Image (cartoon, helix red, strand yellow):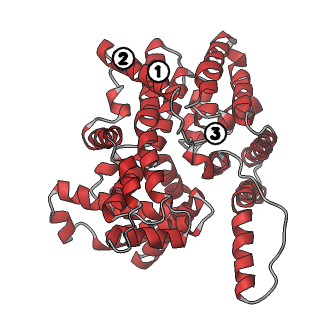
Amino acid sequence: MVFSSHIFVYYFLPIAILSYYLLPLKAKHFGLTLLSYLFYGWANPPFVLLMFASTVVDYSCGRVISGSENHRNRQVALIISICSNLSLLGFFKYFNFGISNFNTLLDWLGMPIWETVLQVTLPLGISFYTFQSMSYTIDVYRSDAKPIRNFVDFACYVSMFPQLVAGPIIRFSEISDQLKQRTHTLEKFARGIAFFSLGMAKKILLANPCGKCADTVFNAGVVSTLDAWYGTIAYAFQIYFDFSGYSDMAIGLGLMLGFTFPKNFDSPYRSESITDFWRTWHISLSSWLRDYLYIPLGGNRLGSRRTYINLTLVMLLGGLWHGASWNFVIWGGIHGGMLAIERKRGKSSYYESLPRQLRIGLTFLLVLFTWVFFRCSDIPHVLNFLKCMFSSANIHASTNLIAGIIYQPYYILTMCIAGIVVWCFPQTWDWTQRLSPFRMGVCLLLLFISLAIMSTQAYNPFIYFIF
């Protein structure tokens, strides 16, 4: 079940909110956990058992870590937690990828490939909830958070439906106090509605039309240079509005339930460098990788050369986290390399002397280039598309059909509005800080328009399934 669906908006959400507020205080977490398990298991109920098993393991390890005075026992519990989560993620997300590459190697060596009928289905949102659950045992081990005693409260934290399948990745230390006590106010609920409305508008009104253009271009065999760049920009808008829209809806749903989740996007396409981009794009993931991987590897404390290696390694793993494909690894490697170059270059470079708007434009162009690796299906697809972006050779008459689709007034208008929102409008987080009747009216109007268009849209993908 996803937020931008009829079953969620018209059935699940009203029942969930009504049930939550009708339940007594002591039963709210239990009720929210059951609702979240229903939400998660709607399409594939057996995957609920997988999440429950992960929850039991991490809760038990957390109890051992907090209750034992033996340092070795605490270390063993932490290792069990980390290894179980990574094993779970590794098997379900990378088994098919590993077998495919292993067979490619065998074929290259002239050896018979390994025949297997096992095809592993990727559980929705497994990358998010394993990282989230794992942060609990790490935080407790580091004494960054107090252990939780009630299993239902912990299960509620892991499975909470607002951020379960598409983030943001909520760390236990960020929400532990709210699990014990939080306020439910009309002001917070109204801001939650505003967040949800604006997130839905981003998804339905901007991300979906831009995604239709992007799919048309990327799925074509050969396109013109102009079409290739247009499609890449469309994809950049799609992934931003889709992901930030889902994050806004998740934050809004959390507010309706009394929780305050952290900001996950902060105008990333206005960044003046790749370093700034990763401070503002998918903040919950980039900060998770920084605190739980980059810093433990040594961060910038072991000299410049080790810092560059750490940056590149973390981004390679971050790319692989996004999907089981060499495209994602290369995408992460390019970003890691650019981060290392910027770290080495420092603040005294010629780049820093350029006008701010030019730095923003150049950074966006670099990000656009890397999105090609993120969007294409495989390496040959990447090479073919890059050739189209930088060469106008081998253009067929059939490309006129593509132009007839993507340059329709509706799509051009949507792209223009998307650009205005990206570079001129305030962030949802800031705009909803002080809600006037006018602003609330705008939010509700956008929600009404979004729901009306959602009922007519045949194109409404959930692009985070691969994550």
Residue type at mark 3?
Lys
Give the mark count: 3
Whole-Å distance between the Cαs marked 2 and 3? 38 Å
The answer to whether the residue labelled 1 contacts the one labelled 2, judged by CB atoms less than 8 Å apart, is yes
Any mark on residue 146, and which? 3
Question: x and y percent of residue 195 in the render?
Answer: 44, 27
- 251 or 60: nearer the viewer: 251
Q: CA distance from mark 1 to mark 3?
A: 32 Å
Q: Please name the residue shown 31% across and 57% down the image.
A: 364
Other residues around mark 2 within 10 Å, as few (<14) / some (14–19) / many (≥20)? some
Q: Please indicate whether residue 275 sits to the left or right of residue 362 in the image.
A: right
Which residue in the protein does label 2 denote? 440
Q: Amino acid at mark 1?
A: Ile
Residue at the disc numbered 1:
193
Front tag of 1 and 3: 1
Q: Is residue 161 visible?
A: yes
Q: Which SS class for mark 1?
A: helix
The mark closer to the camera, 2 or 3, is 2
Q: Is residue 302 visible?
A: no
Looking at the picture, tell me which residue is in the foreground, 391 or 203: 391
| Image quarter of residue 425 | top left
User: Sequence order check: which comes first, mark 2 or mark 3?
Assistant: 3
- Residue lying at the far bottom in this picture: please name it: 110
In the depicted structure, whether residue 455 falls above or below residue 211 = above
